[in-house]
Amino acid sequence: MALSKKKLSESEVSVEIDLEKLLGRAARDKGAREVFFQLAFDKLSERLDKGLDANGKKMAAYSRKYKSSLAFEVFEKNNTVNMQLTGDMINDITELDSSKDKLKIGFQSDFSNLKAYANITGDRGSNKAAPAREFFGWSDKELKAIADEIKPSIKEDPILNDAKILAFLTRFS
Amino acid sequence: MAKRNLASVKITGTAKVRDNLLKFVQQQTRDEGVLNELGEFAADQIRKRVRGKVDKEYQQDPLTPATIGIRKNLIKNGNSKTPQTSKPSQSNLTLSGQLLDAIKHRVNASLATINIFLLKPRTGYILKDGSRTKVDKDNVEIKSDLEERGRLFLFISKSLNAQLQSKIAQALRKRLSLYRKISSK
């Protein structure tokens, strides 16, 4: 059975990860959840830096029109399709309301959500076809690799500093 | 449903050319390395968002015909920062690039503040004969003139603010002992 479930609509683009299957009882540990999220985000970023989608395939190339645009020149972009110009969409990725044993990852703002939907489906609301780029999500292999990295260290007691950091992170969410 | 972001970012303009970017009170965020990275990122993003015309808040009003005419000649003489896409009518506070390139940052780790400011010096434009124009005003004075005309640029937009807060949250997560243990393997 899959370790994650995708949702794809204009109002919500998200992935719900079955943390209990991956981490067992530690799925409810706040520190472990935050680290899992960060490692998942890091993994996504690494993949995007290589221009790969959630299935590990190269994403469709940029159009000639986009490559000759002012924004392309100013942001010093190259041919690697990394789904980032300002970075607003990718850095808007956050944990959404999740049940205790699951980790739901999606986009904080409605605008980023719409952008993500348009990029993933190629549906930009016009008659002109745009390439679909399935950039958001993680394979079961990737999720297992993240869980395997975390599991050995979870049993150790958290330090006082961790409590302060987690309290501050709560203010952001 | 997305969780609301409760942290706030304060921008305070002062009589001098400094704008406070962020204030933290937690010890974890007094890391000079983290603050420098954020400051550099913020300065770079303001520059690129204004110049690249990709953020609505930094959008500038159209130029006057007189300004367009002046820009046309200056671009012809090789003064353009973005030669491939530069147009005389382009309203993005960029010709030679000196104004936006003068946006810098400074960190005070003990107060956990990042200041974004403008360096004053600039050089004249290149003329047809290869000589340069005289410099009448420095970048700070130009900024004041622009602001009087409603052309604002030295601030943190809502979307840039959101991204900075995300980066702070990422930096905090990476300080959790579990993350550090995994990363150090």
Image (cartoon, grey):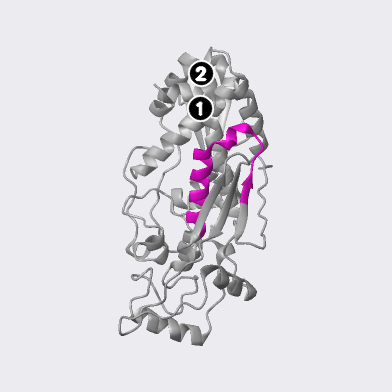
The kind of residue on which mark 2 rests is Leu
Residue at 49% in and 20% down: A22
User: Which mark is on residue A119?
Assistant: none
> Can residue A107 be seen in this snapshot?
no
Q: Is residue B138 left or right of residue A53?
A: right
Q: Please give the count of numbered marks on the rendered protein.
A: 2
Quick check: A161 above or below B5? above
**Which residue is located at x 56 percent, y 40 percent?**
B168
Magenta-drawn stretch contains B25: yes
Start-end of magenta stretch: B21-46
**On the image, numbered disc 2 is attached to which residue?**
A23
Instruction: Calculate the distance from the C-alpha at mark 2 to the C-alpha at mark 1.
Output: 10 Å
How dense is the environment of label 2, judged by Cα within 10 Å: few (below 14), some, or many (20 and up)? many
Residue A16 seen by the camera:
yes
The C terminus of chain A: image quadrant: top right
- What is the magenta segment's predominant secondary structure? helix
User: Which residue is identified by label 1?
Assistant: A36
**Label 2 is found on which chain of the structure?**
A
Q: Residue at x 56, y 55 (%)?
A: B116
The verdict on residue A75 being magenta is: no
Q: Where residue A117 sits: x, y (%)?
A: 50, 49
Badge 2 vs badge 1, beta-carbon distance below 8 Å: yes
From the image, state whether disc 2 or disc 1 is nearer to you. Answer: 1
Q: SS at mark 2? A: helix
Q: Position of residue B151 (x, y in %)?
A: 59, 71
- Given the image, what chain letter belongs to the residue carrying mark 1? A
Percent across and percent down for residue A45 are 42, 40
Q: Residues within 10 Å of mark 1 (few under 14, many from 20)?
A: many
Position of residue B175 in the picture relative to residue A84 (left or right)? right
Q: Residue B72 location, x and y as percent?
A: 40, 83
What's the residue type where badge 1 is placed?
A: Phe
Decide which of B72, B113 is in the foreground and name it. B113
